Amino acid sequence: TIAGGSTGHKLLIYDTCILHFLFQFEGRKYCEHDFQMLFAPCCHQCGEFIIGRVIKAMNSSWHPDCFCCDLCQAVLAEVGFVKNAGRHLCRPCHDREKAHSLGKYICQKCQAIVDDIPLIFKNDPYHPDHFNCSNCGKELTAEARELRGELYCLPCHDKLGVPICGACRRPIEGRVVNAMGKQWHVEHFVCAKCEKPFLGHRHYERKGLAYCETHYNQLFGEVCYHCNRVIEGDVVSALNKAWCVKCFGCSTCNSKLTLKDRFVEMDLKPVCKHCYERVPDELKRRLSKQDPKDMRKKKMPICL
């Protein structure tokens, strides 16, 4: 088209505007701005027009570099994606999410879900068949054992004579605690109640479990008849009652008694022989009027 014929200048009149054309579509030419406004999709991530390759996914359009995993931000244009609860995830993240929902592990070598029992190596889970025994070369199972950074099948490991921890069932390479007929890692021999390691301190056993002194006394200890506190340490059993060693004594003169001393029961309390001999005759006569069985229990010296 010629405009201003007297001058002889040629001016191209395009379909939308008079800028230099950059794009042609269906036989018509468009500048970049108008082409974008008319035909270019907007990226769902950055909101900019997409010129060139378009990724169509999740009912939206994306720049190839903008279409990323919702969890790890890995670019998905070349590797594909998996829909997961309205999210677009890479395969490894999808598998981890699925494994978490199923309560399973992800193999740290192939990144697939471990459907059966995993092999734990250097604190990470794996499919057992990724490894072979360092001694015999046999393909390993979940029963394999790690020792000094190497993996062994159970028969080969047992031949090495390494002690196994009674708690974690893993080999013990350092210091060994021998207790309750088993061997333990120092940090795994703990109180069944508070789970604190004993670290060489005394432990108390009950029904196959170990307890620190504090919690053993709280759970199973007897209460002293005299001080009404849980007895820590040895227990004196006398007169059908329990006493602290330091609390068991004559109720009259407060002299200490042991199970080897002679004493009698008066008013449900122990009285040493010497104090009983000083009891007024009137009191002795009243005691003598009680039931003969009770009198014998109260008057006759008891040697325990």
Image: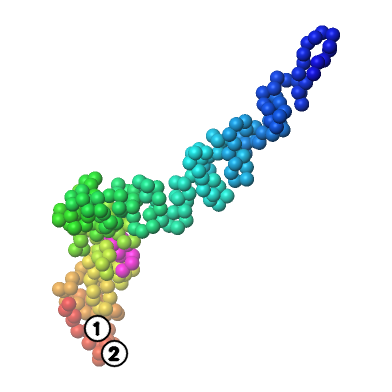
Q: Is residue 64 magenta?
A: no
* CA gap, disc 1 and disc 2: 10 Å
Is residue 263 visible in this depiction of the protein? yes
- Residue 245 position, x and y percent, is 23, 67
Q: Which residue is mark 1?
A: 298
Q: Which residue is mark 2?
A: 290
> 155 or 200: nearer the eye?
155
Query: Residue at (23%, 56%) from the top-left corner?
Result: 165
Query: Residue at (23%, 74%) from the top-left corner?
Result: 237
Contact (CB < 8 A) between labels 1 and 2?
Answer: yes
Q: Which mark is residue 158?
A: none
Secondary structure found at label 2? loop
Badge 1: how crowded within 10 Å, few (<14), some, or many (20+)? many
Question: Mark 2 belongs to which amino acid?
Answer: Gln
Question: Mark 1 belongs to which amino acid?
Answer: Lys
> 7 or 60: nearer the eye?
7
Which quadrant of the rendered structure holds the C terminus?
bottom left
Residue lying at the far top of the rendered structure? 7
> 93 or 23: nearer the eye?
23
**Stretch of the chain drawn in magenta:** 211-220
Is residue 175 visible in this depiction of the protein? no
Query: Residue at (27%, 62%) from the top-left corner?
Result: 210
Q: Horizontal placement of 58 versus 269: left or right?
A: right
- Residue 277 sits in quarter: bottom left
